[in-house]
Image (cartoon, rainbow, N blue to C red):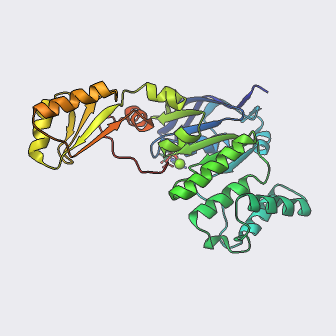
């Protein structure tokens, strides 16, 4: 083994004349969480489907679990588990029956299948719901059942395509705990997400997919260092005050609609005081002042072409 769970070089895929992946390179060391970020339609699901053998690439040197995807897809399939973007749960049968079906697909002997199903239902807090049709489950329960089903074959590498999209903050945190538990057991996790804070929380390494290639890759800290996103945000309720402040703070970028100014700043007390002093001299007072340190949103917007978008207050999910 190379110590790499996943290694892709020069991965290409087109649909008709639309090139979705135009030479993607990525490597994921064993036992780590790798997060693939990208706007809608960037090709995240396409990458997951290719690496999990569901569709074939047009080109690329691709290895998963030490096996070549082109010559040995069966060995790859035996090493991985996939939880797709859209649930694989059958709503007409119960959670337990879904689990037993997976056990059958993995050719587990009946007793063993029942044991594994019971253990996973317990682990994912689905014992009470186990005898109810899955169509009656909440989104979070369905997602947990999805992952439980993925784990039936005891895969060493799992692909999770947007595992928390549509979940409320509590269910999202539960899912994060589940993912951390998998990693603690030595499982390698390949995760796609729309949530930058999710990648920040979970991933050892993060890659941003944009325009068919990896626009940036690194740890969350490394990625934050590549963009200067730090600023002070000033909000006004009075348009006249907003205009006076804008002329006092020449380097600020403004949003006339929401009456907010964004002043580049390193967040230090010294720079903050300088901003306040200039507002004082101009005789204006902001109705709200927030200090914003660079985060993955800044990286994401800078790399995917939305740098001019003023930062919005974050959803409080942490
Ligand atoms: N079977 C297909 N036939 C034609 N085009 C496709 C097919 N599957 C995906 N595409 C196109 O490939 C591009 C990438 O799609 P993909 O689903 O991989 O994006 P994504 O990053 O997962 O997006 P999302 O965040 O919305 O899930 C899109 O433009 C999509 O329309
Ligand atoms: Mg997708």
**Residue in the image at 55% along x and 29% along y:** 219
**Picture layout, residue 214 above or below residue 110:** above
Taking depth in this image into account, of 213 and 242 the one nearest to the observer is 242
Compared to residue 176, the image places residue 141 above or below, namely: below
Can residue 278 be spotted in the picture?
yes
Q: Residue 56 sits in which quadrant?
A: top right
- Residue 306 visible in this rendered orientation of the protein: no
Q: Could you say where residue 206 lies in the image, as x and y percent from the top left?
A: 55, 34
Q: Position of residue 135 (x, y in %)?
A: 62, 72
Residue 107 is left or right of residue 92, and the answer is right
Figure quadrant of the N terminus: top right
Taking depth in this image into account, of 318 and 32 the one nearest to the observer is 318
Q: How many marks?
A: 0
Residue 11 rendering spot, x and y as whole percentages: 59, 31
Left or right: residue 136 compared with residue 166: right
Question: Against 1, is 199 above or below?
Answer: below
- Determine the residue positioned at 86% across, 56% down: 107
Q: Is residue 214 left or right of residue 312?
A: right
- Residue at left 34%, top 26%? 266
Identify which residue, 120 or 231, lies in the foreground.
231
Judge left or right: residue 209 versus residue 90. Answer: left
Residue 276 horizontal/vertical position (percent): 21, 32
Q: Residue at x 49, y 43 (%)?
A: 197
């Amino acid at each position: 083994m190379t110590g790499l769970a996943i290694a892709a070089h020069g991965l290409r895929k087109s649909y008709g004349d639309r090139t979705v992946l135009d030479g993607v390179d990525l490597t994921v060391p064993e036992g780590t969480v790798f997060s693939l970020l990208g706007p809608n339609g960037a090709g995240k699901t396409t990458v997951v489907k290719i690496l999990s053998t569901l569709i074939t690439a047009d080109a690329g040197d691709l290895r998963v679990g030490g096996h070549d995807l082109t010559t040995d897809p069966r060995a790859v399939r035996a090493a991985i588990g996939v939880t797709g973007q859209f649930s694989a749960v059958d709503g007409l049968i119960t959670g337990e029956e879904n689990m037993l079906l997976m056990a059958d697909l993995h050719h587990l002997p009946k007793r063993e299948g029942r044991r594994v199903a019971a253990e996973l239902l317990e682990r994912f807090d689905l014992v009470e719901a186990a005898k109810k049709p899955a169509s009656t489950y909440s989104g979070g329960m369905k997602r947990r059942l999805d992952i439980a089903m993925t784990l039936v074959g005891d895969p060493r590498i799992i692909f999770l395509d947007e595992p928390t999209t549509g979940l409320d903050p509590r269910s999202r945190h539960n899912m994060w705990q589940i993912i951390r538990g998998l990693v603690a057991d030595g499982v390698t996790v390949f995760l796609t997400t729309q949530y930058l804070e999710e990648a920040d929380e979970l991933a050892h390494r993060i890659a941003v997919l944009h325009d068919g290639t990896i626009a940036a890759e690194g740890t969350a800290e490394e990625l934050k260092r590549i963009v200067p996103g730090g600023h002070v945000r000033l909000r006004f309720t009075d348009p006249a005050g907003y205009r006076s402040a804008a002329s006092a703070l020449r380097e600020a970028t403004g949003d006339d609609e929401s009456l907010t100014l964004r002043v580049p700043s390193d967040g230090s007390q010294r720079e903050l005081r300088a901003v306040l002093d200039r507002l004082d001299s101009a005789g204006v007072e902001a109705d709200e002042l927030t200090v914003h340190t660079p985060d993955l949103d800044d990286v994401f917007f800078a790399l995917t072409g939305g740098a001019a978008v003023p930062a919005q207050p974050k959803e409080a999910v942490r």
